[in-house]
Amino acid sequence: MRNQPRDVTGGEAVWGGMIPGLQLMNYLLGLLTVPIEVFLRRDFGERYFTRMNFFGGLIILLLWQLAGSLFGLLNMFNPLMWLMNRTSSGSSVLPGIIKWYIIFSIGHFLYMWWKDIIGKPVHSYSAGRSWLRPVGGALMFVLNLILEQVVRMLLSMTPQADQGRLSSLLPVLRDKDTFTERFVEPFVVFVFALMFMSSGQYMVAWWLLFSVMALNLYTGIRHQAERGVFLDYRDQMIDAEFYRAFLAGEQSEGTNAQERMVRETAREVEKNPDVLQVIERKNPSLAAAIERISPKLKAMGQEPQRPDEESQPIAA
């Protein structure tokens, strides 16, 4: 059976070869997520917000400030800016942002150290908890009130036998952290970007706009990876139920591919029975299923031990 996600696009490796600069862009977007997450979240894990990630985010902010200074210098010699009586002041706020980035980061590192000291460490891969979580919870409450009416309208048009399954969908939105990270955080950052843009802080506004894209991209990738872990556990439960039903002689729905895999593996093992011991060590359930459907292997397992193979008593 397939044990890898189906990706007909070929994944990032293929697209990186087709589109020049794609991998560099993803790398830079990854660095851009660090500073904005430092301001948006708390309770980071040690292997999520590392020292190298901190320095990567700091370098991005310093380079952004340098770019803002260069653009400001070029605008001084731009006649169009003289005629419009406009100058970009985007770099003026960035030093303050860098200062607070360092202060917040030190606070995060001290908090992680303190949690270790008191014996209550955060999961090392934790992406933190958003400061905007209460806002996300309030929005979820309002949206669930609206979506609940939609579900109840569908219930009125659903047969009685299926109403119980449909009613289990309530509430529709349940994961407060995911909702906040995917929708609330990017929206708030986008609003701040518009505010800085309207006040003439163009470099800060562009930094925030790129941060919105970075947040959406990498938060989506992380949630997909977390979903993948859950799917792995669920697949193990499905496999366990299949082997239980298979060994009991029951027919399970939707297990044709698994049963075909067992039978094909059994045919290969019959050609080389010694492999069964290796399979038994790695997957005892599969080995038991193979023995059940393979008369040859089952007979081999039931053969009486030969006299010359029996253990001889130890001479006194």
Image (spheres, helix red, strand yellow):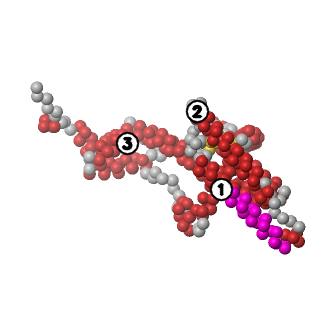
Extreme residue in the bottom direction:
79
**Quarter of the image where one finds residue 310:** top left
> What's under tag 1, amino acid-wise?
Ile
Residue for badge 3: 283
Residue 191 screen position, x and y as percent: 78, 52
Residue 59 is marked as: 1
x and y, in percent, of residue 160 in the image? 64, 37
Q: Check disc 3 and give the amino acid type.
A: Asn
Count of numbered badges drawn on the protein: 3
* Residue type of the residue flagged with mark 2: Ile
Residue 201 locus on image (x, y percent): 80, 58
Determine the residue positioned at 34% across, 41% down: 281
**Is residue 124 in the magenta section?**
no
Principal secondary structure, stretch drawn in magenta: helix
- Reading the image, the residue beneath label 2 is 117
Whether the residues at callouts 1 and 3 have beta carbons within 8 Å, the answer is no
Quadrant holding the C terminus: top left
Q: Of 205 and 294, which appears nearest the observer? A: 205
- Dot placed on the residue nearer the N-terminal end, 2 or 1: 1
Q: Earlier in the sequence, mark 1 or mark 3?
A: 1
Element type at mark 3: loop
Q: Residue at x 13, y 29 (%)?
A: 314
